[in-house]
Image (cartoon, rainbow, N blue to C red):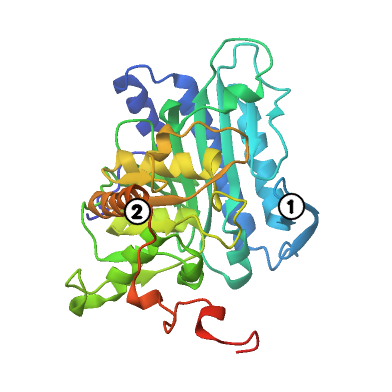
């Protein structure tokens, strides 16, 4: 799809979207507008991070025990301040904070909650590769009073809006309020986001995928089966060649899928067996799934639709497969067949002589 001609400003678009979308409150548009201002500020901070001494780690860690990057903390406070600015947000949940934060500036009538990863892929900043912010907006289950943890722990089907900002060659804001997915580009001359990518759609089929193949030996059998078929190329069971991409930032992977197609996987593995997956459900998985589904794609854990997973805890992790519907459905089918048979899939690409087999299975020493 050609991104031209340039459309209305974000503010004008949201005004029309509110008018045309049943049940969409003006407060949601106001929250997105406040976040957009913060995204522009974060984009500037990322751009001059090396000049301002903002690269590298901070002295603190997040709720998952991972060391904060300096930019993580800056972005977190920028988004928190944006949520508090208009008074429409009663509380926030962030990857960088242990529990929900109640916003002192919230109006008594504040009806919404926001969950976000303030700087997704922040390790990419050190090598000047694309990063972003991703967010989800929920309407409170009740009016008035301080929001409780349970109000955040709701399935993605209850989101009223989700989106992300992308800090790359251009700064973009991509969002959905339930009527398709639309992309806006920041005009550095005016400071306004303008509609440049209306009605983004994910092609149903694809020959491109994104996955961290270095973890292949730890994947479950259904994912190894699918991956083996893809890298088998035109001589393999799929009868065609696939291209592989990997950026290392969820927002960038989702953006590529929304703009050119493909499928992204961060599957469950045995490398960290106590964790069901790597990505956080509440503020990574569900907003990404919402956007991809709104664009005609699909999103699954491999065994269930991501948007139907009810979080059990704030920082719950999940496996994630999203993108082209036909490819996601194939991967889900492989999981279903594997679970029904109760036997691991045996693929010659992963046998004891395989490049992808564990070292012990190939008789290799630790230094090999």
Is residue 325 placed above or below 290 in the rendered structure? below
Q: In this view, which residue lies farthest toward the right?
A: 59
Q: Position of residue 326 (x, y in %)?
A: 23, 52
Q: Name the residue under label 1.
A: 65
Decide: is 237 above or below 149: below
Q: Quadrant of the N terminus?
A: bottom left
| Mark 1 neighbour density, 10 Å: few (under 14) some (14–19) many (20 or more) | few
* Residue farthest toward the left in the current orientation of the protein: 239
Q: Give the left or right position of residue 289, taking residue 214 as reference.
A: left
Q: In which quarter of the image is residue 221?
A: bottom left
Give the x, y percent position of residue 315. Answer: 62, 41
Q: How far apart are marks 2 and 1 (CA)?
A: 34 Å
Residue 256 in sight: no
Which numbered disc, 2 or 1, marks the residue closer to the eye? 2
The residue that appears at 33% across and 47% down in the rendered structure is 340
Circles 2 and 1, Cβ within 8 Å, touching? The answer is: no
Q: Name the residue under label 2.
A: 338
Disc ID at residue 360: none
Residues 137 and 319: in front is 319
Q: How crowded is the residue under tag 2: few (<14 C-alpha within 10 Å), some, or many (20+)?
A: some
- The answer to which quarter of the image holds residue 240 is bottom left
Q: Which residue is drawn at 28% across and 50% down?
A: 333
* Quarter of the rendering containing residue 222: bottom left
Q: Residue at x 62, y 87 (%)?
A: 365
Please give left or right for residue 84 compared with residue 321 in the image: right
Question: Which quadrant is the C terminus positioned in?
Answer: bottom right
Considering depth in this image, is 96 or 43 the residue closer to the camera?
Answer: 96
Report x, y in % for residue 97: 71, 41
At mark 1, the secondary structure is loop
Name the one closer to the observer, 329 or 225.
Answer: 225
Relative image position of residue 74 (x, y in whole percent): 70, 49
Residue 185 as seen in the image, left or right of residue 280: left
């Amino acid at each position: 799809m050609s991104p031209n001609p340039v459309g209305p400003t974000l503010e004008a678009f949201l005004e029309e979207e509110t008018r045309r979308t049943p049940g969409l409150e003006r407060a949601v548009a106001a929250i997105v507008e406040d976040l957009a201002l913060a995204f522009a500020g974060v984009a500037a901070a990322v751009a001059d991070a090396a000049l301002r001494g903002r690269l590298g780690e901070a002295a603190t860690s997040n709720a998952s025990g991972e060391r904060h990057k300096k930019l993580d903390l800056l972005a977190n406070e920028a988004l928190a301040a944006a949520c508090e600015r208009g008074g429409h947000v009663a509380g926030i949940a962030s990857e960088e904070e242990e529990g929900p934060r109640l916003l002192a500036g919230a109006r008594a009538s504040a009806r919404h909650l926001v969950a976000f990863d303030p700087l997704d892929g922040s390790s990419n900043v050190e090598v000047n590769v694309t990063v972003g912010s991703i967010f989800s907006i929920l309407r409170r289950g009740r009016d008035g009073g301080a929001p409780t943890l349970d109000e955040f722990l709701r399935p993605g089907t209850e989101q009223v809006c989700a989106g992300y900002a992308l800090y790359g060659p251009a700064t973009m804001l991509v969002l959905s309020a339930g009527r398709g997915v639309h992309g806006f580009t920041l005009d550095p001359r005016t400071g306004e986001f303008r509609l440049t990518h209306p009605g983004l759609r994910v092609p149903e089929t694809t020959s491109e995928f994104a996955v961290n193949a270095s973890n292949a030996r730890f994947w479950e059998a259904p994912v190894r089966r699918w991956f083996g078929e893809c890298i088998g190329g035109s001589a393999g069971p799929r009868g065609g060649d696939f291209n592989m991409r990997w950026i290392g930032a969820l927002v960038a992977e989702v953006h590529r899928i929304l703009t050119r197609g493909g499928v992204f996987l961060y599957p469950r593995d045995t490398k960290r067996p106590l964790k069901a997956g790597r990505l956080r459900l509440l503020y990574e998985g569900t907003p990404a799934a919402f956007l991809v589904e709104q664009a005609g794609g699909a999103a699954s854990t491999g065994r269930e639709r991501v948007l139907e997973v009810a979080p059990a805890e704030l920082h719950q992790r999940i496996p994630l497969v999203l993108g082209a519907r036909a490819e996601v459905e194939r991967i889900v089918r492989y999981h279903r067949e594997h679970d029904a048979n109760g036997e691991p899939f045996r693929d010659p690409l992963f046998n004891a002589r395989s490049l992808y087999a564990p070292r012990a299975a190939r008789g290799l020493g630790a230094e090999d």
